[in-house]
Image (spheres, rainbow, N blue to C red):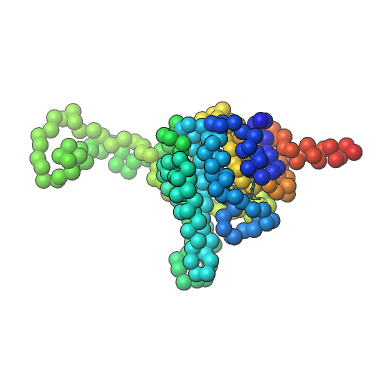
Amino acid sequence: MEINKIYNENCLDTMAKMPDNFIDLTVTSPPYDNLREYKGYSFAFEEIAKELFRITKQGGVVVWVVGDATMNGSESGTSFKQALFFKEIGFNLHDTMIYQKVNYVPLTHNRYEQSFEFMFILSKGKPKTFNPIMIPCKQAGKVEKYGLERRQNHGSKHAMRLYDETEFKATKENKIAPNIFAYTLGREKTGHPAPFPEALANDHITTWSNEGDLVYDCFMGSGTVAKICVQTNRNYIGSEISEEYCKIIETRIKECGGLFFNSFETELSSEAGT
Ligand SMILES: C[S@@+](CC[C@H](N)C(=O)[O-])C[C@H]1O[C@@H](n2cnc3c(N)ncnc32)[C@H](O)[C@@H]1O
């Protein structure tokens, strides 16, 4: 199976070519509910989920970015059903993260404006890679007496104990970021109706994989995951069923200096030669 390549086909066909335990990380966003029609292409969720489990290495991760449509006055709940199905087939639901849309589109209706999607972090066993984003601690350098006291007395603030000075620790400079990530939509003018913010792809690729790892996107859309892999020295494989979107991917990868060999391009050059 060739890597650093976009396969212009159904992702089930691409995954069928992959051996078991092959991929370090998948970052993807399915065509959820009927929010967008994506040219009528269908999407067999359960089969795809099982194949993702098979091809993911032990300790590998799938980042599944998804939201729900509202139909007949009710949210579909598809995102929850999908997360629970992933658990049923063996993935750990390692973390339910939120992708907050800073510049969400205001709609007139009888509920608060929809401004987030889920980012389910699914792992095959314990994640083998975690390079967390760190943020500064507001209390950096201050002595952590109170916290220590409560912890050592099993949470009871009334229990008393004498302390040795060496037990007092200064708060660290940095801590692990919280699991709500905020992004501004629409910075990437790709021609695709729903590209990831590049920062979202970058944050997950650098968190859950290392340089040289193999990253997959089964719904590659405009190629954001491939572009970020090129920029962060990861290998990639992508599946995208639409020929039109494959052209967008080709342009984006060329622009960022990556190699691009896709089956669609091969077809085009052979046509050009006849
Ligand atoms: C939500 S978009 C992905 C957008 C992508 N994350 C990006 O940054 O551009 C989903 C994509 O999946 C593609 N798609 C739908 N069903 C597919 C299938 N069975 N196999 C491969 N691609 C599929 C659609 O054409 C669409 O481009």
Residue located 46% across and 54% down the image: 80
Q: Where is residue 66 in the image (x, y as percent from the top left)?
A: 52, 52
Name the side, left or right, on which 16 lies relative to 169: right
Q: Where is residue 86 in the image (x, y as percent from the top left)?
A: 48, 45
Q: Where is residue 59 in the image (x, y as percent from the top left)?
A: 46, 32
Residue located 10% across and 42% down the image: 159
How many marks on residues?
0
Q: Where is residue 83 in the image (x, y as percent from the top left)?
A: 46, 49
Mark yes or no: residue 44 visible.
Answer: yes
Q: Identify which residue, 184 or 265, lies in the foreground.
A: 265
Residue located 68% across and 56% down the image: 40
Residue located 50% across and 43% down the image: 63
> Is residue 198 placed above or below 70 in the rendered structure?
above
From this viewpoint, which residue is outermost toward the right?
274
Q: In which quarter of the image is the N terminus?
A: top right
Q: In which quarter of the image is the C terminus?
A: top right
Mark yes or no: residue 115 visible.
Answer: no
Q: Identify which residue, 49 or 95, lies in the foreground.
A: 49
Q: Quadrant of residue 232?
A: top right
Name the side, left or right, on which 107 lies relative to 177: right
Q: Quadrant of residue 161?
A: top left
> Is residue 39 placed above or below 140 in the rendered structure?
below
